[in-house]
Amino acid sequence: MKNERQLAPWLVGATIEAVGRVTERRASRGRPKQHRMHRSERREQLLQACLLAFARDGLELTTMDSIAATAGVSKPLVYRHFHNRREALAAVVERESERLLELLGIEAAAGSPPTFEQLTTTFLQFAADSPASFRLLFHLVDAAAGSAKRRVDQLRDRVGRAMVASLLSEVDPSDLSGAPGPSPDAAWLAGMVSSIVEGVAGGLARGEDPALRAGALRQLLRPEGLMAALVEFRHPSQPVASVGQERS
């Protein structure tokens, strides 16, 4: 019986070994089994891919294809969890909003509410540790519309009101006698505080220390200043009379 060299003299040395490996590989049909994720695990994987894709490419350039590529899965698999890009955006915004509120301790039912320094330090640490989340929530979604934008607006209001409440709790109760009680009219103050905190947090991309930035915020936002702003908003000072009125 002729051997391999007699049947195919050009197949020598490494070539014969390579052919043998190919033959063995073809003989073992089927692909190795892949780990099948539970639906909740897969959704978390896709939400993380959504976060990275939106933060990296922006809202307009992110597609279902780019989300699938970021997750390393097929596009039909992405469509099993999200009908479209807008739904994917709303889902990841909801997840990151809840995560931030949990970190801040605002939604905690038990225990004393967090102090202003705890809130600001945690918020700034969130911006430093999760730049993609911070960019998505407080930069990119402002240009969006629909449920994602509404959710971030609610988040800002919730965080701002918590910070205002924590600051005012540090004021002597006797000093609050002339201040208005909680009112929807003071929503602008919560928005102002939230905007200042977001602006300072945005500088953490330069590698600044969150603890030092929290100290700077404490100097910018003082309890007595907020209290005065609340009183002024509800009881504005009398306008100065015009020249015509003075002459009359």
Image (cartoon, helix red, strand yellow):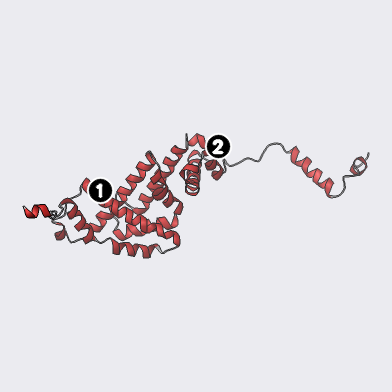
The residue located at (68%, 37%) in the rendering is 30
Q: Quadrant of residue 28?
A: top right
Q: Which quadrant is the N terminus positioned in?
A: top right
The answer to whether residue 25 is seen in the rendering is: yes
Residue 153 lies, with reference to residue 205, above or below; the image says: above
The residue located at (12%, 55%) in the rendering is 243
User: On residue 187, which mark appears?
Assistant: 1
**Callout 1: few (<14), some (14-19), or many (20+) C-alpha neighbours within 10 Å?**
some
Residue nearer the viewer, 217 or 168: 217
- Identity, as a three-letter code, of the amino acid under mark 1: Ala
User: On residue 153, which mark appears?
Assistant: none
The residue located at (16%, 53%) in the rendering is 236
User: On residue 75, which mark appears?
Assistant: 2
Where residue 213 appears, as percent x and y from the top left, is: 36, 63
For the view shown, which residue lies furthest in the left direction?
A: 248
The residue located at (91%, 42%) in the rendering is 3
Residue 22 lies, with reference to residue 240, above or below; the image says: above
The kind of secondary structure element at disc 2 is helix
- Identity, as a three-letter code, of the amino acid under mark 2: Lys
Q: Quadrant of residue 76?
A: top right
The answer to whether 25 appears left or right of 126 in the picture is right
Question: How many badges with numbers are in the image?
Answer: 2
The answer to whether 1 appears left or right of 22 in the picture is right
Where residue 25 appears, as percent x and y from the top left, is: 74, 41
Residue nearer the viewer, 10 or 18: 10
Q: Are marks 1 and 2 in contact (CB under 8 Å)?
A: no
The answer to whether 226 appears left or right of 141 in the picture is left
Query: How far apart are the alpha carbons under marks 1 and 2?
Result: 42 Å
Q: Nearer the viewer, mark 1 or mark 2?
A: 1
Where residue 218 appears, as percent x and y from the top left, is: 30, 63
Q: Which is more N-terminal, label 2 or label 1?
A: 2
The kind of secondary structure element at disc 1 is helix
